[in-house]
Image (spheres, rainbow, N blue to C red):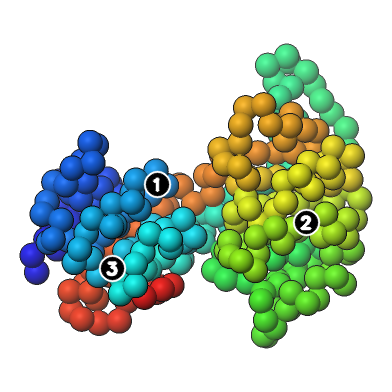
Amino acid sequence: MGPLGALLPESVEPPTAAVALWVVDQDGSFAADPESIGFYVPTYMGPPSCYEVIARLPNLQVVQLLTAGYETALPFVRPGVTLCNAAGVHDASTAELAVGLVLASLRGIDDFARAMPQGEWRGGRREALADKHIVVLGAGGVGQAVGRRLAPFEVEVSLVGRTARPGVLAREHLPELLPTADVVVLAVPLSTETAGLVNDAFLAAMPAGSLLVNVSRGAVVDTDALVAHTTSGRIRAALDVTDPEPLPPDHPLWRMPGVLISPHVGGNTSAFLPRARRLVAEQLDRWAGGRPLHHVVSG
C-alpha cells in the first residue's frame, strides 16, 4: 500500500493538516518522495500552492477535496487524474448558517449586536420568518438541507435546480418565482452556467425589501449589481461568500445598511472534521481496493 498508511497518521490532528504536512512542507519541499504519492488531499481552504503542487506529483491518481466546490482546483488537475469533491461533508453546517443568516437579517440580530457596546436598547417590530416564501436556488445536498431546515418555520419553500424533478422546479421557473420571493437562498456550485447568474435583472425581479442570502460562491452574484440594489435599499443581503474574497476592508458592502457578512465559514464547524475523516478514510479504502470512488467531478 506504500504511502497510504502515512497519509493519515493517527498522531496528527486534524486530517487536513496531516495530509498537508505529509505531502509538502512550509517551504514547498516534499516530506515524502513525490513519485510515491498517488492520493492527495489539499489543505482545507488552503492557498493556491495547495493545488500548484499537483504538477509535481508525477504518479498522482486522485485529488480528494475537502470542499464541495471544486472550481479552484479544477485548472490544476491534469487529464488522467481523478478529482473528487466533498459532497455531503458541509451540507449540515452550511444549511445551519443559511438559516441563521436568514433569521439574523429578518429579526435584526446584527443590529442588536452593533447596539450592545453603546448599551442602546433598540426595540421595534421586526419581520418574522413565518409565512415567508423562500426560494432556494440549488437543489443539491446543501440546497436540500436548507429546505429541510426551513420547512418547520411555517414557510413556503420553492426548491429550484437545473432541471425539474419531484419536489424541484427548473431554473426556467425563476421569472415567475422571483417576484413572489421574500427570501432567495443561493446554494448552487460555481460554474460557467452560474457565474453572474444573480445579475441586475435577477435582483430587479425580486420584490422591494426582499433578502438575498448567498452561501454558495461569491461569483454567482454580480457584485456591482448587488451594491447598486443594496445602496438603493431595494434589496437586503446576507453573504457568507463574496466576490472578491476576502472582501477588501474599504469595500462598500461592509458598511451597507441591510447587509450582513460572514467570512466564508459556512462549512467550517465542529461537524466538519468527523465528516471529513469519514470521507477520506472511505475514499482511501476504495482507492486502495480498486473500487469506484464517490463524488467524482472529473477524470
Dot 3 falls on a residue whose secondary structure is strand
Q: Residue furthest top?
A: 118
Q: Name, please, the residue furthest toward the left.
A: 2
User: Considering only order in the chain, which callout, 2 or 3, is on the residue closer to the N terminus?
Assistant: 3
Residue found 69% across the figure and 78% down from its top: 168
Amino acid bearing label 2: Asn
Name the foreground residue: 49 vs 182.
49
For the N terminus, the quadrant is bottom left
User: Which quarter shows the C terminus?
Assistant: bottom left
Determine whether 165 is above or below 262 in the image. Answer: below
- Residue pointed to by mark 2: 199
Residue identifier under label 3: 62
Circle 1: residue type: Pro
Q: Secondary structure at mark 1?
A: loop
Tag 2 secondary structure: loop
Which residue is painted at 59% across and 54% down in the image? 217
The location of residue 73, given as percent across then percent down, is 42, 58
Q: Residue shown at 75%/70% (left/top)? A: 158
Gap between marks 3 and 1 measured at Cα: 18 Å
Name the residue beneath numbered marker 1: 48
Residue 117's image quarter? top right
3 or 1: mark nearer the eye: 1
Identified by mark 3, the residue type is Val
On screen, 282 above or below 276?
below
